[in-house]
Image (tube, grey):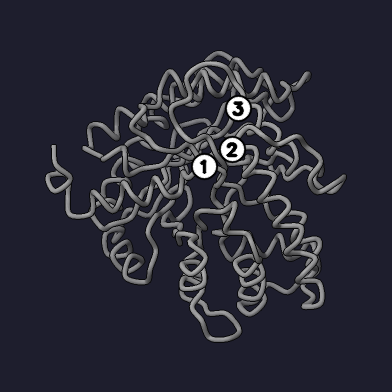
Amino acid sequence: MSHAALGPYAAELIETARAIAAPGKGILAADESTGTIGSRFKAINVENNEENRRKYRQLLFKTEGIEEHISGVILFEETLYQKADDGTDFVEILKQKNMIPGIKVDKGVKPLAGTNGETVTQGMDDLDVRCAKYYAQGARFAKWRAVLNIKDSIGATPSMVAIDENAQTLARYASICQQNGLVPIVEPEVLMDGDFTIEVAAAATERVLAAVYKALSDHHVLLEGTLLKPNMVRSGSDAVPQADANQIALATVRVLQHTVPVAVPGVTFLSGGMAEEEASLALNAINNTPGPRPWSLTFSYGRALQQSTLKAWKGEDANVPAAQAVLLARAKANGLANLGKYTGGAGGEAANASTFVKNYSY
């Protein structure tokens, strides 16, 4: 089938997805909502106002050399329209550095009544209009986060209602994005909150991903023009003992092998509250796991790229170069991890601080 038969943007979608999944590179998730960035700022005693948010994102995007390790940046809507001190659009700065601008398009989660605290993601209204507007502003990919929970060890959660509802909305979102020129990042996050084994997490993640790819197929989504943003398969946050990096890698890769078609160019893992160093070492282990790995297995990290950077910045202009150096070191570590060549040690002791937030929302 020709690209033309798959829609007017098919060739561009495939090119964009492949560029984001380039070897040695991954995604900087800088799409924290105004409320979420506020909690990050509060921790470093910085006021949460538009100017401080702009200055912080400028610090990230203008880091010299960051483009060697970052292929795409996910933005919050406010940031998509902001400018640097010199009046240059942030989108233009990213493009000049060959980093592809992306945009968060979901509107958070709402409860599914009658379930054990499960949710479905909102934001479908006018999504086509918003996607067209974001494309015109320079965005070339999008992100939509679904959230699923493990509340037991017998397979009752996530429930089929939650799995099916979120799979269908992810697929509909992906289809709408592609019709408007945006590569959809499909993010079905199974939260690692709770006291359960890595085996329970693996079974739940596999059920979720299988349903998501069935829905994407039913909705005629061009897989070559998509990316997947899943959780790594880990022990629950309260479980003892915790699975190590090699166990995480083996379980994660096995689940992907069972569920993710080879047509998908890249799997860009979320960090899910792991410490910066932990997230880098787990990704490195994943890229050294035996057996077929036909996708780029890389990162789409927010907290695990930014936590130490924020602490180094502290809202002070004088600290910008130091904060950028911290960010660059972390990005380089993750770029090496994508290649299976990260040996550890980037960021020192600060990189071992947990980024975990229970029932995390953006």
Against 254, residue 266 (above or below) is: below
Q: Residue 338 has which mark?
A: 2
- The location of residue 54, given as percent across then percent down, is 61, 75
- Quadrant position of the N terminus in the picture: top left
Q: Quadrant of residue 56?
A: bottom right
Image x and y of residue 320, in percent: 76, 71
| Label ID, residue 286 | 3
Who comes first in sequence, dot 1 or dot 2? 1
Residue 107 rendering spot, x and y as whole percentages? 44, 56
| Mark 3 or 1: the one toward you | 1
Q: What label sits on residue 23 in the rendered view?
A: 1
Q: Which tag, 2 or 3, sits closer to the chain's start?
A: 3
Q: Residues within 10 Å of mark 1 (few under 14, many from 20)?
A: some
Q: Give yes or no for contact between labels 3 and 1 (Cβ–Cβ under 8 Å).
A: no
| Residue ID at (31%, 37%) | 223
Residue 110 visible to the viewer = no
Q: Residue at x 12, y 44 (%)?
A: 5
Q: Secondary structure at mark 2?
A: helix
The alpha-carbon separation of the residues under discs 2 and 3 comes to 8 Å
Q: Are marks 1 and 2 in contact (CB under 8 Å)?
A: yes
Q: Position of residue 46 (x, y in %)?
A: 76, 71
Is disc 2 surrounded by few (<14), some (14 to 19) or many (20+) residues within 10 Å?
Answer: many
Query: For the residue marked with disc 2, what is the amino acid?
Result: Asn
Q: Secondary structure at mark 1?
A: loop
Q: Residue at x 39, y 55 (%)?
A: 141
C-alpha gap between disc 1 and disc 2: 7 Å
